Every structure is written in structure tokens, then in C-alpha cells.
Amino acid sequence: MPSAAACPRPGPEPESGSDFGSDTRSDTEPDSGSDKNTRSAPDARPAPIPFRDSARAFAALAGAGFRRHSTYRQATVAGVFTNIVFGIMLCAVYVDVAGASGRPGGYTTAQLVSYVWVGQGLLSVVCIWAWKELAERIRSGDVAADLLRPVDPLAAYAAADLGRAGYAVLTRLLAPLAFGLLFYSMYLPQRAVTYPMFAVSVAAATLVSFAGRYLVNLSGFWLLDIRGPISFWMLILGPLCGGYFPLRFLPEWAQWLVWCATPFPSVFQVPLDIAVERTSSGVAAATVLLQIAWAALLFQACARVQRRAVTRLVVQGG
């Protein structure tokens, strides 16, 4: 998460007796001589800030996330090299499959080549890898500082993740695409509406991925070690999002089950199908709406779980 300098100054500190991590009750004992009224402890949460200030804070946090990841230049170069190497291997496999099967999953050879190179670029944009920054802050107790800031932690981490994704678009997405265009016969979108629809789909996919990772990290409020939930998330996300192979290679009943019952295709498969124009514009627009619906549902789940966790917060050290 970006440093606290990127956030607006927090509101007044809560009065004593309401600090996070303490074992005090939210309701104090009634005043002496009174048997009717009890006084509640002051709310530890800062007062909400106006929308304009919230927008400025969100933009500042997104910019901080962009700048933070732009400092890892050597890691970016190494990541691009790895994407290109895996892209070459996957292209060889998919071209052979297309040559033997004709149109596997309804994709032409050129569409499969584009699927590979766009997919290699999107891996870091949507970030399907393990992420446990929030869980580490919960474990150390640093999350108490996040909760005292006027910007909700969910919004703050989402802004930082969008900044990270913006940097990944300029580096990790464009570089593999340029390599694929130079050395392979890629399918280029023929419909003008595909380009803005792809941009919206990538943004929605990033939000769905972030919400899923954030929800997994929230389990750290109940578990001392979240390596199990993270491993399970990674285990099911890879094959069910289209990262290992196009989901349209599956039997039709399995496709319907994965698409309708899980958010995983919205993370990876949807933007790739839009990029290679696997479906009509109408179907593509419907899948983008499905992504937005999953993003809204997952963010709502994150907010509810976070509220439930804060009511029983216990700092595990720090």
C-alpha cells in the first residue's frame, strides 16, 4: 500500500478507551447514580470526507501506486523477458493444435496467436498472482493505522492497485504485444468498437481480480497464516480464468458452469475474447456487463467482511 504521505491527513485521534487492538468494550459502565442512560464510547472511525476530497485522495493513491511500481525497473525487464519466452512456447503449442484441429474452440490460428500475446501482457495487468500485503499488515498490527485514516482501506488499496495496473499496461502489456506483432501473424480487431470495449473490460477485470485478492487477504483477521487461502485461490484461479488454456476448449456444459457460477472468466477470458473478436459485439458487451456485475458484487462482499472484521479486531503483535 502506498505510504501514508499519499493520503489526506487523518481526522482527530479517538479519545482514550477506543484504540484499535484494545480489549475494551464499546459500551462503558453507566454513570454513578444513573440507571437509565449509558454512554457509548466515541466512534474510532474518522468522519467521512467530501466527495471532491475523496476523488483527490483516490487519484493521489493511484499515482502513488504507479510511481511505486515504476521503481522496479529490473523486475519489469525480467518479467517482460519471461512473458516473451512463455509466449513463444505457447504459440508453438497453439499453432500445432490449430493445425491439427482446424478451429479449436472456434478460434482461428491468428486468433490463438493473439490470445497468447495479449494474454501474456495481461497477466501482470490483472495480477492473477499471489498478493498478501493487507494480510501482512493485519498480522503485524499496522492495519490499525489504515483503519484510522479518512480513506477507507478498501478504496485506498483499490486505488493503489489501479495505479499498479496502469504502469503494467505501459510496460508489461505493450512489450509482448510489440514482439508478437513483429514476429507473428496476429489477428487485429476489425471492429472499431472492440478497442474501447477492450479497455473497459481490462479495467473491470483488474477490479474483479483485486476484489478477489482483497477478500482472501481479509481472512487474515481470523487466521494467523493465510498461505492456505492464497494457495487455494491461485489453484482455482489459473485454470478457471483462462490463464492455462482458453475456456472454450472445455465441453459446453463446463463452460456454462464456469461462466455463470464463478467470477473467474471475468478476470482473464473476457478481455481476451474481446481482443480477438471471438464473439459478436452484442455478446462482448454482455460479457463486459457481467464483469461489472461481478466487480460490484465482490466489492460489496469485501466491504461487508471488512466491517465484520473491524468489529472484532485484535492486533496480533506490533
Image (cartoon, helix red, strand yellow):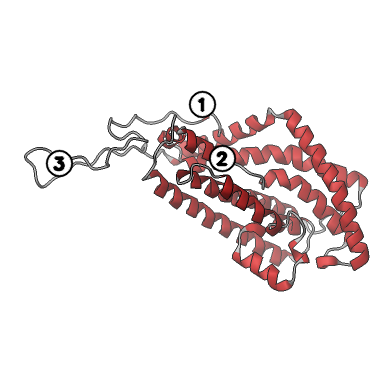
Q: Hey, which quadrant is residue 32 in on the image? A: top left
Q: Secondary structure at mark 2?
A: helix
Residue drawn where x is 68% and y is 27% of the image: 71
* Mark 3 residue type: Pro
Q: CA distance from mark 3 to mark 2?
A: 43 Å
Q: Mark 3 or mark 2, which is nearer to you?
A: 3
**To which residue does mark 1 refer?**
5
* Mark 1 residue type: Ala
**Front-most of 277 and 208?**
208
Residue 216's spot in the image, x, y percent? 54, 49
Q: Secondary structure at mark 3?
A: loop
Rendered-image quadrant of the C terminus: top left
Q: Where 317 falls versus 101 (above or below)? A: above
Question: Do the numbered discs 3 and 2 sit on residues whose CB atoms are within 8 Å?
Answer: no
Q: Secondary structure at mark 1?
A: helix
**To which residue does mark 3 refer?**
30
Residue drawn where x is 61% and y is 59% of the image: 263
Q: Hey, which quadrant is residue 31 in on the image? A: top left
